Image (spheres, helix red, strand yellow):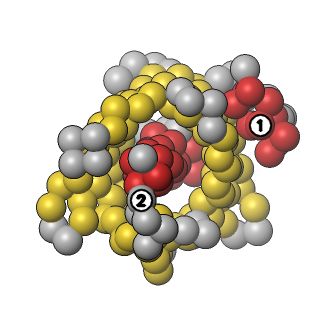
């Protein structure tokens, strides 16, 4: 069960970070992720025997040459988690992202109405051993204020899970990191 929980946390983290916004033609990653969003998602892994839901709230803002995306998660079993992405623009449509559990950097590409993220992260298995998982997310707008993220997780080249999240953008407000935590408790 611990590996399943770790996979869910890892997937949710990726998805929320990527799914809090989506690019439109000519839009930047910063435009897509800025502000507040709340997502409802489901992680599935037949291999790990997991089918779990979660709610994630995000808050994105510019900070010192980076774009920062704070995330707060509430899983259907009541577990809470927080993560923070820091993105840096590397080209007209490319970024790198870092987070405390990511191996190296995430590669991000914005093409017209699609954001793609690819990265590896370390999580813990059932017996406490470290597992390295690979993530591929595709994020698209599905309405004026709705973003859909479809993510695939693999290990050693084999698909081990997927995650689907639908995000709803919130009206722009100054809530900061504390506001993200409040939204996650709602």
Q: Is residue 106 visible?
A: no
Residue 170 place in picture, x, y as percent:
65, 23
Query: Looking at the rendering, in which quadrant would you find the C terminus?
Result: top right
Query: Which of label 1 and label 2 is nearer to you?
Result: 2
Residue 45 place in picture, x, y as percent:
27, 43
Q: Is residue 151 left or right of residue 125?
A: left
What is the number of the mark on residue 181? 1
Q: Quadrant of residue 36?
A: top right
Label 1 to label 2: alpha-carbon separation? 28 Å
Q: Is residue 15 left or right of residue 171?
A: left
Indicate whether 148 appears above or below 88: above
Which residue is at a point 33% across and 59% down the rendered structure image?
Answer: 135
Residue 66 place in picture, x, y as percent:
66, 66
Q: Is residue 156 left or right of residue 153?
A: left
Q: Earlier in the sequence, mark 1 or mark 2?
A: 2
Q: Which type of secondary structure does the marked residue at label 1 adopt? A: helix
Q: Which type of secondary structure does the marked residue at label 2 adopt? A: loop
Q: Residue under circle 2?
A: 126
- Residue farthest along the front direction in this orientation: 127
């Amino acid at each position: 069960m611990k590996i399943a929980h770790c996979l869910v946390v890892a997937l949710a983290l990726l998805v929320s970070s990527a799914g809090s916004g989506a690019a439109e033609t000519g839009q930047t990653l910063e435009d897509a992720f800025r502000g507040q969003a709340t997502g409802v998602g489901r992680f599935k892994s037949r291999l790990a025997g997991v089918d779990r839901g979660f709610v994630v709230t995000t808050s994105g803002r510019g900070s010192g040459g980076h774009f920062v995306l704070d995330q707060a998660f509430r899983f259907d079993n009541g577990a809470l988690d927080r993560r923070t992405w820091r993105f840096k623009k590397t080209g007209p449509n490319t970024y790198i992202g870092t987070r405390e559990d990511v191996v190296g950097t995430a590669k991000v590409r914005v093409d017209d109405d699609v954001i793609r993220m690819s990265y590896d992260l370390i999580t813990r298995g059932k017996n406490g051993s470290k597992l390295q998982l690979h993530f591929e997310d595709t994020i698209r707008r599905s309405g004026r204020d709705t973003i859909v993220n479809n993510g695939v997780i693999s290990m050693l080249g084999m698909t081990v899970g997927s995650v689907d999240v639908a995000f709803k953008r919130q009206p722009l407000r100054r809530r900061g990191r504390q506001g993200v935590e409040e939204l996650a408790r709602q």
